[in-house]
């Protein structure tokens, strides 16, 4: 089969032929890829940022946002059948450790992460397990929802925390309305009662945010903190959901937060710099967010099937993987880029 592989850090990816994956265990599932999301993390992988953390041997196949059709299954698989349309939870988990048994499988002690530390989905086929596949509604197509497997799941995981920790009428400032942000906005609109205020440097992104559910849109022009404070009677927002995490976003976001507010960190790239006395005196909280759980993904698919969460996507043939990465890196992608084998 065809596979797009990392052959060296700071080098370009290469399209090559590799053996098809095969079923070797009773819970194995082989998926024919119908869509693979192109994520900024893929750029970071090529820059070597994940080399030490993942410990993956090169070459390997990249791609961690995947959906498609079940091609083959092990003899103990009962939750899906050959031909089913599925989206893949990004982790392959053991089901036996304490985290898995608590339903917190994102912190599985024995996980593998296709596209990060083992072969992923920039390919014709991907091998995963029964614990990682979620059947999707017949109305959904793999290429349309593939990026929900990670970008959408991460956004849902964080937005669901906001929904649980706020009350109707509270304000949540969403920093960044790009690939993750526009999903998080839709989730907040669907499952919470907060007033959603979006801040982004791109006027088009702000316009899209309002279109998909934000109540207020602010173009970041240096006055965004003052504008948020004006909208909140000078008190700040009860929650800030930061999908950027770099370029000064965190210092501005903290300035938008009210006393006893919660700062939800999703984007990364810079340090949070705040005197500890300010944390204590205002009782603000910083909450990290990784990818969501399998149950989070099933809930997100319910919203997608109901039309409450929609991805804005640009599709590319698998062979045009480099163009997709270049467009993403240059900021030319609105929403998410999807490779279609």
Image (cartoon, rainbow, N blue to C red):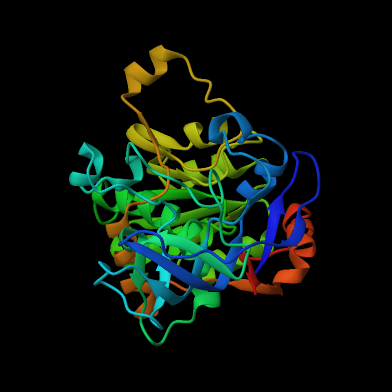
| Quadrant containing the N terminus in the rendered view | bottom right
Above/below status of 70 relative to 233: below
Residue 308 visible to an observer of this rendering = no
Residue farthest to the bottom? 139
Q: Residue at x 24, y 50 (%)?
A: 164
Q: Is any atom of residue 329 visible in this view?
A: yes
Q: How many marks?
A: 0
Residue occupying the point 38% across, 87% down: 138
* Residue 217: image location, x then y, percent: 55, 59
Identify whether 216 is placed above or below 100: below
Which residue is more in the foreground, 312 or 315? 315
Residue 153 vs residue 193, the one in the foreground: 153
Give how far across and how far down residue 242 sits, in percent. Answer: 50, 43
Q: On the image, which quarter does residue 136 sit in?
A: bottom left
x and y percentages locating residue 58 in the rendered image: 67, 42
- Can you say whether 308 is above or below 113 in the image? below
Q: How far across and down, in percent of the image, does residue 128 sit?
A: 42, 60
Please, which residue is most extreme toward the front here?
24
Q: Residue 251 occupies which quadrant of the picture?
A: top right
Q: Nearer the viewer, residue 230 or 15?
A: 15
Could you say which quadrant of the image residue 50 lies in? top right
Horizontally, is 331 left or right of 30 in the view?
Answer: right
Screen quadrant of the C terminus: bottom right
Relative to 231, residue 251 above or below: above
């Amino acid at each position: 089969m065809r596979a797009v592989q990392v052959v060296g850090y700071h080098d370009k990816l290469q399209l090559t032929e590799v053996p098809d994956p095969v079923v070797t265990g009773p819970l194995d599932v082989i998926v024919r890829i119908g869509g693979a999301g192109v994520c900024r993390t893929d750029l970071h992988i090529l820059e070597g940022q994940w080399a030490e953390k993942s410990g993956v041997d090169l070459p390997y196949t990249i791609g961690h946002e995947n959906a498609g059709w079940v091609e083959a299954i092990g003899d103990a698989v009962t939750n899906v059948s050959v031909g089913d349309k599925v989206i893949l939870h990004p982790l392959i988990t053991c089901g036996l450790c304490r985290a898995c048994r608590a339903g917190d499988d994102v912190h599985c002690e024995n996980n593998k992460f296709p596209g990060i530390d083992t072969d992923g989905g920039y390919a014709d086929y991907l091998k995963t397990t029964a614990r990682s596949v979620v059947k999707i509604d017949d109305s959904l197509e793999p290429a349309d929802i593939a990026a929900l497997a990670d970008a959408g799941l991460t956004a849902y995981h964080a937005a669901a925390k906001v929904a649980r920790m706020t009350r109707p009428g509270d304000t949540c400032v969403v920093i960044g309305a790009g690939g993750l942000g526009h999903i998080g906005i839709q989730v907040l609109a669907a499952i919470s009662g907060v007033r959603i205020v979006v801040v982004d440097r791109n006027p088009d992104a702000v316009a899209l945010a309002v279109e998909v559910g934000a109540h207020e849109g602010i173009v970041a022009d240096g006055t965004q903190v003052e504008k948020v404070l004006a909208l909140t009677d000078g008190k700040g927002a009860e929650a800030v959901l930061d999908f950027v995490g770099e370029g000064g976003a965190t210092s501005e976001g903290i300035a938008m937060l009210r006393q006893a507010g919660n700062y939800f960190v999703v984007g990364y790239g810079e340090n949070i710099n705040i005197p500890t006395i300010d944390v204590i005196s205002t009782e603000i909280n910083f909450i990290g967010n990784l990818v969501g759980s399998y149950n989070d993904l099933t809930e997100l698919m319910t919203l997608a099937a109901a039309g409450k969460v929609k991805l804005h996507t640009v599709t590319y043939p698998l062979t045009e993987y480099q163009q997709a990465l270049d467009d993403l890196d240059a900021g030319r992608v609105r929403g998410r880029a999807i490779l279609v084998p």
